[in-house]
Structures are given as C-alpha cells and as structure tokens.
Amino acid sequence: MGRILLLRSWHGLIVIMGVTIVVFVVTRMIGDPVDIMLPLEATAEQRAAFEHQLGLDRPILVQFFDYVWSLAQFDLGDSLWQNRPALEIILERLPLTLYLCFSAIAVAVLVAVPMGVIAALKPGGIIDKITVLLSLGALSVPQFWLGLLFIMVFAVQLGWLPAGGAASFKHLILPALTLAIPTMTRLVMVVRSQMMDELNAQYVKTAEAKGMPLFRIVGLHAMRNCAVPVMTLTAWEFIRILSGYTVVVETVFAWPGLGLIALQAIERQDLVLLQAIVFVIAVIVVVFNLAVDIIYKVIDPRIKLD
Amino acid sequence: MEYPSDSTHPDGDEAPDLNAPQIQEEEKTSTFAKAKALLSELWHDKPGFVGFVIIVALVLMAIFAPLIAPYDPAEQSLRARLIPPVWQERGTWEHVLGTDHLGRDILSRIIHGSRISMIVGVAVVALAGGFGITMGLIAGFFGGRIDAAIMRFVDTIIAFPGLLLALVILAVIGPSMTTVIIVLALNGWMVYARMTRGIVLSVRQMPYVEAAEMVGGRSFHVIFRHILPNMMSPLLTLGVLEFARIVLAEAALSFLGLGIQPPATSWGLDVANGKDYLFVAWWLVTIPGCAIAITVLAINLLANWARVTSDPQEREKRFATSVAAMRRRKKSSSPAIQAAE
C-alpha cells in the first residue's frame, strides 16, 4: 500500500511537471510574452526594460530552472495586472470556486442517485424512458446557454433569484444548478445501468425469495455494490468541473472565483497570473486523485491499486 | 439432429422467415444494397432516424449556406435593429427569426454559423482520431516497452487540466479557427488511443490474427488488413460522440471570446453577443442556443443508434423484442396459430 501510494505520488509529480513544462513552452517559446503583455506602441527601450524586469533576456534554460525553482518555493510570481503575488489572489478566490464546485457535485449526486435507482427498478418503464430522454436532452444543451436561460427565466422574468455575483446563498443556486446538470445526467446513466446489473444478480433474487422488502435490498445490498463505479465517475466529474467548466459558468454568472479571474487574466494579458492558476489547479487535481485512490482502498478492500 | 427440423420449436419456425429479407440483402455485397439495408435499419429506430435527417439537413445547410441564406450574415442595418421573430408582435416576414443588435438577420447567421460547427467538428475528429488511433494501434500491437511508454504518456496528458491549458494556449497564440481546431484536437486524442489499444489487445488474441501472423503477414499488413476493420464500428460511434462534444466545446470557446472571432459567424459567438440584451431581446440568445442544442441532440441520437446497432448483444436483444412483439400480434390476430401451438 505504502509503496503504491509512493508510486502514485511520483506519477502525480510527473503530471505537475508536465503541466509546468507545457505552460512554460507555450508562454515563453511559442508566444512572445512581451508582445502579449505590452501595448503595440511600446518602444524598443520599453520592451528591453520589460524583458529585463521579467528576466526574459536570459538563456531559456536558465529561465526554466529559475521558474521551476521558484515554483518549488511556492513563489508563483507577481501578477502584472494587480501588482501583488499571484498566489495571494488565487488563495482569495479559490474558496469561492471550491464552494461552487462542491455544491454542484452535491446537487448532482443527490438528484442523480435516486433518479437512477428509480429508473432502474423498472427498465423500459415510463419513468425509465423519461429519465433516459431527459438525460439525452440535458446532455445536448450547451452549459453557458443553459445558464443564460436560467437567468432569463428566474432572474429577469420571475425575479426570484439574482442574476450574478456571490453575495448570499441565493446567488449560489443558479450557478450550482447550471454546473450540476451535465454531471447529473452522466451520473444518472451510470447509476441506472449499474443498478440494473445489480438487480439482475443472484443475491438480489435470493434476498427477494427470502421476502426482504425492496427498499432494503436496494439500499442495503445493491447500493453498496454500485458505490465504487458511481464514486469513480463523481471524482472524475469533480475534476472536470474544477479544471475548466467553472470558467464558463463563473463567467455567465459573474461568480468571482478562480475561473472568472482566469478569464480576466487572459483579457488583461496577465500571463503570470494565468500560469499560476493553471499550476494551482493542476496541483489540486493531482492531490484530489491521490485522495480518491486512498478512499477507494478504504471503501473496497478488494481493489488493488496498481 | 432432430432439433433443427422441429417445426414447433419457437425459434425453428418463425425466426428464419422474419430474417429472410435481411439476409438476402446482406448477401448482396454492392455498396448500394448495404447502404439500403443500413437505412432501413435506421428507419426502424425512430429517434436515430430523426437525428440522421437533422444531420443531413445541417450538412446540406452548411454546404449551400450562401445560396440558402436570405441575407449576408455580416450585413448591418441600423434601421432594422432588434426586430423580434415573426411570431412576435413586431415581427416581419422579411426577417423570419428577427435581427440582432446590429440589425443583422439572425436566420442568415444561423445558416452560416452551421459551417463553423461542421468544419471544426470534422477537422477535430479527423485530427484527434487519426493521431489517437495510430498511437493506440502502435501501443496495442507492439506491446511491451512501447506500449508502456505511450500509455504512460496518455495517462499523464489525461490528468492535465485540459480546458484551462487550452485557454492558455489560445490566449498566447491568439484565437482563430485553426487554433481552436488544434487545441481541441490536442485535448481529445487520448480517448481514441485508449479505446483502440483496448480493442487491439483483445483482438490480438483471436485465432485469425495469430494465423495471419503465423503465415508471415507483416505487422502493417496485419494491423490494417485484419485488426483495423474489426474496430471500425466502436471507433465510429466514439467519433460521432466526440463530434457532439466538439460542437459544444467550440461554442463554449467562442462564447468566452477565445474561439471564432468576428466578423466570422459562430453560434457560440452569437450567444455571447446577445448576452448583453437578455433583458430586452430574448431571441438573440435563445435562437443560436437552440441551434447548438438541436445539432448536438441530433448527433447524440445518431450515436445512440450506432452504438446499439454495432453491438451484437444489443442487436440480439432488439431482435428478440421485435420477434416477441410479432408473436403477440400474430397470436391475437389469428387463433389458428394459437391452436397449432
């Protein structure tokens, strides 16, 4: 167990290093940071001064090792736009993004699991057909558009909920729901098919024959066997949401999290901040994956991590 | 020995005569007959057929966009700003789906926007699919160290925060259709590689591949002649599903301002433009969004059909239900059969 975790951590480290290298290559070698960050009318002297300030006039390898060395010390550089450490900005915004992501995942699981189970109880029945149709429909709707529709209906027409911002719990409802819906639909499909498989298993027939009530069979026996695949997908969906989809939803609802700041960093051409955000997200994803591996082992001792 | 001739056996008497036309059609090897058989099969899956029809219509619309579109999608008119669709109070037949904040005809923009979705979708699927399938074939066929190296690489890339990295690349290189295609392809080839490798590994154990190798077929010959044809249907299904994902991704990137740039038209871009007019003109956001949703839904329906059709187990299930339905109908209509049984 310890050895395997060590191996997993090593793989995680490789991922983080890979992301670092890709970001470095893209920002320093493919694009010219000076071009991107300075206005077009900057003079040659201004450009040179800026290059010197960022250390871009040094050999590329020196720059790379310097970059990695400062990352290792948790120094992610200073944001050019806000003139303060990028890490400080990120730590300010990260809780809001995590709050949004966890709420979305919670909503998705709380809706998807019962829905999937009910659909699986009678395969081909009315509820099952409606569930499948709804999932297929919801999966086809672009997320940003869904968010805008929610704003139009619940904020503009009905005036029940605010259209944007993050001031109160009310502000959370629409973005969390928008973020949750694609996850929910994929989760419903997995819960449904897993549950169908389990309900066809011999142990369920035995339990039925003994006269065990249905909710006990489902809740006590079948659910536990479904837990691992459902958890795998949930973890995967969380990573998906965190590593991209929040950008879209945070933009639609002006939710001041990491995704919104990433987009603003692009608009202000603040590459330092953007690099820092990508790095932090990569670290979170790797740590999260590691945590999920450990949780698996605890839940189901049969799983071998290799 | 008696079993096949036993005419009262449930499978013995009915299955073949239901099957007969299908078998005959499959025996004709001409591509026309094959296409006809496939189409008739598609006809029996109503949602899949609807999806297919919508996709054909979309492709035609994209190809003939300049001929169909009533206006130039970029033509602005200050006098004709924010006209609602025809069924609304102030709507006119001149602009069936209304106009946007610059007086551009929305119907024309939708028609032209379909081009971007189709081009990006096809290009990304071809690029990502081509590269991913090649990697998967190499990994699965040669195995050993090559396999380990490639799959390690795939594992690492999959663990990347893909969309964020895409944003960085787009921010640095500058958004355009080409960059969108490249970024989405870079993000999507791993799925094909994993799937291809999985199939190759299972197919490699099959006697016919072993036989081909034993006879002395070279690796390339064995891969392309014997292994590749056997993975066509799952890969095609994956490709169609990925196409749907790409259409959504392109729309999202364009919406964020990092995809297609004006004056080009894209559905995602149009939704972004209409965002500021949510309070006064609902159709600016709703109509292009509907176009995206309908397209993706159609692709998903077709993919669903392709998945079921290419899976022998699912086909058998479907065949069994149709036979059961036939029997039920026969039983209720003619008591003679009932008596015979």
Image (tube, rainbow, N blue to C red):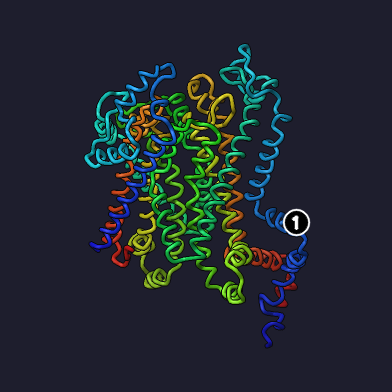
Q: Is residue B94 above or below residue A200?
A: above
Q: Secondary structure at mark 1?
A: helix
Looking at the image, can residue B88 be seen?
no
| Position in image of residue A82 (x %, y %) | 29, 23
> Which one is in front, B109 or B261?
B261
With A165 as the anchor, is A121 left or right in this view?
right
| Position in image of residue B250 (x %, y %) | 52, 37
Identify the residue at the far top of this view.
B79
| Position in image of residue A98 (x %, y %) | 30, 39
> Which one is in front, B244 or A157?
B244
The residue sitting at 35% across, 33% down in the picture is A274
With A210 as the anchor, is A3 left or right in this view?
left
With B75 as the anchor, is B333 left or right in this view?
right
**In which quarter of the view is residue B147 placed?**
bottom left
| Position in image of residue B307 (x %, y %) | 58, 57
Q: Which chain does the residue under circle 1 lie in?
A: B
Identify the residue at the far front of this view.
A59
Task: Say which amino acid is labelled 1.
Answer: Lys
Q: Quadrant of the N terminus of chain B?
A: bottom right
Identify the residue at the far bottom of this view.
B1
The residue sitting at 57% across, 74% down in the picture is B210
Q: Quadrant of the C terminus of chain B?
A: bottom right
Q: Which residue is mark 1?
A: B36
Instruction: Report crowding for label 1: few under 14, some 14 to 19, many 20 or more residues within 10 A (C-alpha).
Output: few
Looking at the image, can residue B338 be seen?
yes
Q: How many marks?
A: 1
